[in-house]
Image (cartoon, helix red, strand yellow):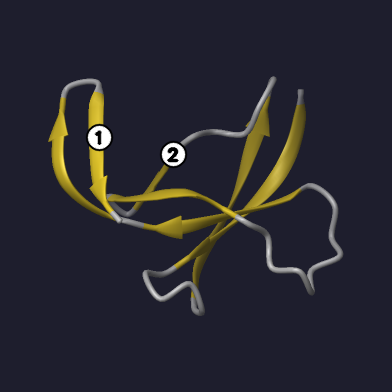
Amino acid sequence: MKAARAILFGLDRRVIVGAVRVVVADQAPKVIMFDGDPFLPMPVPPTWSAKDVLAYGQERPYRADEGLLEVAS
């Protein structure tokens, strides 16, 4: 296990809306919920040189059932 920082980008993928610390056991989380909004993994910006940094982009959900979160891309 290791700790990593996840940077959360808004819908336009340009504005950082938050940063959270996550604990990664085997692989990074597939979704992060922040302030009621889902964030999905995205490529780390190429200009970043920091290790242990993950990038997540905000998505607009269109359906959320128990155990299922679908997003419109």
Amino acid on which disc 1 is placed = Leu
Residue 39 spot, x, y in % from top left = 41, 51
Report the label total: 2
Q: Is residue 2 left or right of residue 54?
A: right
What residue do we see at 79% from left, 68% from top? 48
Q: Which mark is residue 31?
A: 2
What residue do we see at 86% from left, 65% from top? 49
* Marks 2/1: CA–CA distance: 9 Å
In the rendered image, which quarter is residue 43 located in?
bottom right
User: How many residues crowd mark 1 within 10 Å: few (<14), some (14–19), many (20+)?
Assistant: few
Q: Is residue 68 left or right of residue 6?
A: left
What residue do we see at 51% from left, 79% from top? 14
Q: Which mark is residue 39?
A: none
Residue 52 spot, x, y in % from top left = 79, 47
Q: Give the position of the C terminus as an image quadrant.
A: bottom left
What residue do we see at 48% from left, 72% from top? 13
Kindly check if marks 2 and 1 are in contact, taking CB atoms under 8 A apart as contact: yes
Q: Give the position of the N terminus as an image quadrant.
A: top right
Disc 1: which residue:
69
In this rendered view, identify the residue nearer to me: 53 or 70: 70
Relative height, residue 40 to residue 16 (above, below): above
Give the SS element for disc 1: strand
Amino acid on which disc 2 is placed = Val
Q: Is residue 3 left or right of residue 34?
A: right
Q: Is residue 26 left or right of residue 59?
A: right
In the rendered image, which quarter is residue 10 located in?
bottom left
Residue 61 spot, x, y in % from top left = 21, 49
